[in-house]
Amino acid sequence: MKKQRFVICGLSLRGIYHFVLPLIGKNTDGGPNFTNQAELVGILDIDQKRVEEFQKKLGLQIPSYRADAVNQMIKETRPDVLIAVGPDVTHCEYIVAGLEAGCDVISEKPMVINSEQVRRVQAAEKKSGRTVRVAHNYRYGPIPKALKRLILNGKLGRIINIEFTYNLDTCHGSSYFYRWNRDRTMSGGLSIHKCCHHFDLINWLVGDVPAELCAFGGLNYYGANGLLRPRDAHGQPLSPAEEKRKCRVFQKFYTDRLDPESSEMSTGWDGLKLPYDVQYPPEKRRYIYDDAIQIEDTYNAIVRYQGGATMSYSCNFCTPWEGYILAINGTEGRIEVSHRTDSDPTGKMSSAPEIGLITFYPLFRGKEVIEVPPVAGGHGGADFLIRDDLILGPSAESKELQLVCGSEAGANAIAMGEAVWRSIQEHRSISIPGLLAGKY
Ligand SMILES: NC(=O)c1ccc[n+]([C@@H]2O[C@H](COP(=O)([O-])OP(=O)(O)OC[C@H]3O[C@@H](n4cnc5c(N)ncnc54)[C@H](O)[C@@H]3O)[C@@H](O)[C@H]2O)c1
């Protein structure tokens, strides 16, 4: 069998641990390697030192390219598949270049960062006849799969409305506010970067497409005026080091790991300890109360679907536990799930995932509790399955449950996220098809 040739655009943490190591036969996450079916033939990144260090540490000699050399990389390495897994803003250019050169594309979520970029990707996809698949891994979790089965089996009847709350804890939630993700020009803001996971999950579960969305929200905990920000007796900000010493987020998660006097910040778990100096210049201080933060950390939205169902959605990036509370009401009954997904960020406690419990309440009978055992692997077991699908092709289960996410579903999740921040800014509801068509 001919091996599929892959190139990667963005030697990110996600790129390394989810795609690159399994492709080169050095997987560390407990999942399989793919060296018999695939090979990595090119690496592109803006940070050449990072790539060199990576290759040196692993004894590799894979051709590497600068950020502006995607066409050269494709010409010289002749890939079948291009993986876009750098900061979200970089996806569009690399996806389009890959499609125009005749490659299939895998993009990390969000596919791109706004509806204008969606149109560029979809035009290139249509013209090329190749495909874009988006790594919406939440669909692949054991609980979402069980919910999808219940819905496909008609247990709920016609879906009427959805109640969905997703909370990010003080460690995970705050982490977005010192990494590139805090910048709307890099990530589209968290209503796209993070909430696209949640929107795609619900769109896929209910099997419908969003029609209209209206939202409220804001920046409450983080940023220059963040309510968590420690201040002096006169209400003025403290010196950078003092601010960290007094900051409850820093005290809880970083005191024993980072020096408050330095500009160093935790940029995510990286066993290889690679430099990140282009993206995060060491001399530049970054913290969760910086003036540069202009995105929101709290959202409430109401969504109307084309088939008539509605959803109330809430997301908060500073809560005591991480996970979600989801209920879906239909003409035959209601399903409810409350699930904690947080691992212990300090690494001091067991981070074993909790067993999932779905409660099904038929409209006129007693309740049924469905136990969903935890599954090994990142993001609640979803990551192994989606990677198999993306690299080897969809499994029978993936086809049955429609797990593979294409550009249309990727686009709807992005448009909902864009509609959220636009609705907050403009105090009006936003048409999702209108936004996607550029009639905004
Ligand atoms: N599906 C999931 O659960 C999941 C989880 C984590 C991250 N992600 C996604 O994966 C992607 C990477 O996120 P991350 O946090 O691992 O990234 P990261 O911050 O670890 O790495 C970003 C990499 O991109 C490089 N880079 C920056 N600008 C570039 C450019 N213009 N061209 C090429 N390379 C450039 C940086 O040097 C760095 O190597 C994002 O799209 C993110 O949304 C998805």
Image: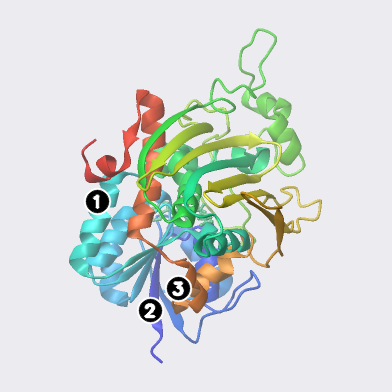
Give the SS element for disc 2: strand
Residue drawn at x 24%, y 72% is 102
**Measured Cα–Cα span from mark 2 to mark 1:** 27 Å
Q: Is residue 374 above or below residue 88?
A: below
Across and down, in percent, residue 319 comes to 66, 35
Say if residue 17 shows up in the picture: no
Residue at image mark 2:
5
Query: Mark 2, mark 1: which one is toward the viewer?
Result: 1
Across and down, in percent, residue 389 comes to 48, 73
Q: Which mark is residue 292?
A: none
What's the amino acid at mark 3?
Answer: Lys
**Measured Cα–Cα span from mark 3 to mark 1:** 26 Å
**Closer-to-camera residue (152/61):** 152
What's the amino acid at mark 1?
Answer: Arg
**Closer-to-camera residue (11/392):** 392
Residue farthest toward the bottom in the current orientation of the protein: 1
Q: Are marks 3 and 2 in contact (CB under 8 Å)?
A: no
Q: Are marks 3 and 1 in contact (CB under 8 Å)?
A: no
Residue farthest toward the top in the current orientation of the protein: 234
Q: Is residue 178 above or below residue 87?
A: above
Q: Are marks 2 and 1 in contact (CB under 8 Å)?
A: no
Residue farthest toward the left in the current orientation of the protein: 127
Q: Is residue 384 above or below residue 288?
A: below
Q: Which mark is residue 399?
A: 3
Query: Mark 3, mark 2: which one is toward the viewer?
Result: 3
Across and down, in percent, residue 298 comes to 54, 31
Say if residue 88 shows up in the picture: yes
Across and down, in percent, residue 397 comes to 52, 74
Residue drawn at x 64%, y 71% is 28
